[in-house]
Image (cartoon, rainbow, N blue to C red):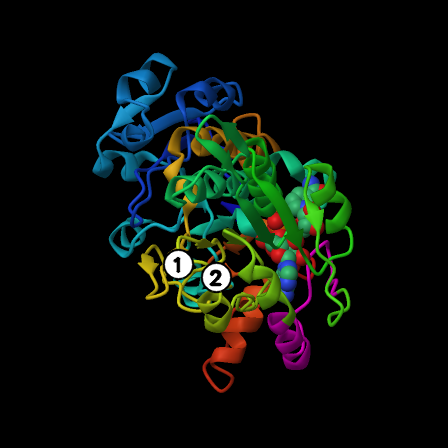
Amino acid sequence: MTADSLGRASTRDSTPLAVAAVKESGRGERRVALVPAIVGKLRALGVDVLVESGAGAAAHFPDAAYVEAGAVVLPAAELYRRADVLLSVGRPGDAVTARLRAGQVLVGVLNPLADPGYAHRLGTAGVTAISLDGLPRLLSRAQSMDVLSSQASAAGYRAALLAADLYGRYFPLLITAAGTERPAEVLVLGVGVAGLQALGTARRLGAVVRAYDVRPEARAEAESVGATFLELRSVATAEGGGGYARALTPDEQRAQQGELSRHIARHDIVITTAQVPGRRPPVLVTAEAIEAMRPGSVVLDLARGDLGGNVEGSRPDETVVTPGGVTIVGADNLAATMPAGASTAYARNIAALLAQLVTDGALAIDLTDEIQAGVVITHGGRVVHPGTIRLLEAAAPAGPARPVAESGAER
Ligand code: NAD
């Protein structure tokens, strides 16, 4: 690959670009980055489509379906040898990462801001890393590539279904010969993409739904899916940039927790999705708030990850029942529990990205493009993503000279 002064580069040569979907290795991961229905879309870009044998099996896409759609199914060793572009959902494990070679392109959700060291390794290895969590999501031409939204939507939908499954009563109001059952009361904290989908799904199941968020626009969005919006007296709105929330001050956070606790106690189900970009998720549900909930209540923490979560006592990928009988689920990757639907949406997002990156069957990296400036993390043997570079520099201020971006927007 050659690069010009603007960081533009191309893989253009005589053989078609080989784009390959890998088998995921993450814990509990059942999704796949490419589904048979999207193979034709990629081939129409003039690329060869490869799929690692068994890559779609956990999402109910057998190898034969990919072959029928026009892909070539290969064992891992040959796939990694032949691929120019590797498509993944999550970050590949260490063994797979070690297999990548200079000049290959890795596309996935790589979370460089959570682990900039990983990006540094890829850059040093000469791998071009493209991480879709860096997409400028509010840009209208980026919306078809928005994997954070498509996967959050799947997670929110699954959250409502999982809550209904774990709750030992009906969701809807039922008036029967055996008496009347009151509807479940569901509170969703954080009304972004996942929160809205959870609200809408719980509402369709018949629950009474309420919502809270610190962004003022969230009220109308929550009301549009039938929720009542909670107004807290003690906390002002807290908008950050780009449609995201800002982190609350410690005083605001304490006031918020105290006031929310009273609302939490009267709900049967609490689903939390609150995130602040580049920060630990805020704690919205304290241990005291959970103690005050009725036995049989269910709390789902979709924000739970290795960095923290919205609910005290939740653990990544674990379900715990408190002595007071409240079930707490650390639901960090619910999209993976709906593998066929989530993978199909993800594959459409990836196809939209490749349609923008591939011209005449060749890949063109152009860091002056606003979308690519957000998602290209490493290129040309170095880290080019400013946010990741800042973190690397902060981690090793006195260390050896760090790779620095020469171009690209502030990210
Ligand atoms: P997110 O995952 O970053 O956070 C989820 C929600 O948590 C957000 O609504 C946020 O305001 C809220 N939150 C953060 N701290 C909170 C706190 N202390 N208390 C209560 N709530 C808190 O959000 P997201 O789902 O990625 O969406 C972020 C924004 O981007 C939203 O405004 C969404 O509408 C917007 N968005 C727009 C598009 C588009 O225009 N196409 C696409 C995707 C997202």
> In this rendering, would 370 be left or right of 195?
right
Residue name at image x 51 percent, y 41 percent: 151
Q: Quadrant of the C terminus?
A: bottom right
> In this rendering, would 342 be left or right of 255?
left
Provide the secondary structure element on which disc 2 rests. loop
Q: Which residue is nearer to you in this view: 411 or 314?
A: 314
* Residue contact between numbered discs 1 and 2, judged by CB atoms under 8 Å: yes
Residue name at image x 58 percent, y 30 percent: 355
Check the image and report above or below for 184 versus 94.
Answer: above
> Which quadrant of the view contains residue 182?
top right
> In this rendering, would 376 be left or right of 29?
right
Q: Residues within 10 Å of mark 2 (few under 14, many from 20)?
A: many
The residue segment tinted magenta is 238-258
**Some atom of ligand 1 lies within 8 Å of the CB belonging to the residue at label 2:** no
Q: Which residue is nearer to you in this view: 205 or 196?
A: 205
User: Which label number is shown at residue 394?
Assistant: none
Count of all numbered marks drawn on residues in the image: 2
Type of residue at label 2?
Answer: Met
| Residue under numbered circle 2 | 293
The disc, 1 or 2, on the residue closer to the chain's N-terminal end is 2
Separation (CA) of disc 1 from disc 2: 7 Å
> Which quadrant of the view contains residue 327?
bottom left
Residue 104 visible? The answer is: no
Is residue 223 one of those drawn in magenta?
no
Q: How far across and how far down the image is residue 160, in percent?
A: 49, 41
| Residue under numbered circle 1 | 326
Type of residue at label 1?
Answer: Val
Residue name at image x 59 percent, y 47 percent: 195
Q: Residues within 10 Å of mark 1 (few under 14, many from 20)?
A: many
Q: How far across and how far down the image is residue 60, in percent?
A: 31, 25
Check the image and report above or below for 144 versus 309.
Answer: above
Check the image and report above or below for 392 versus 49.
Answer: below
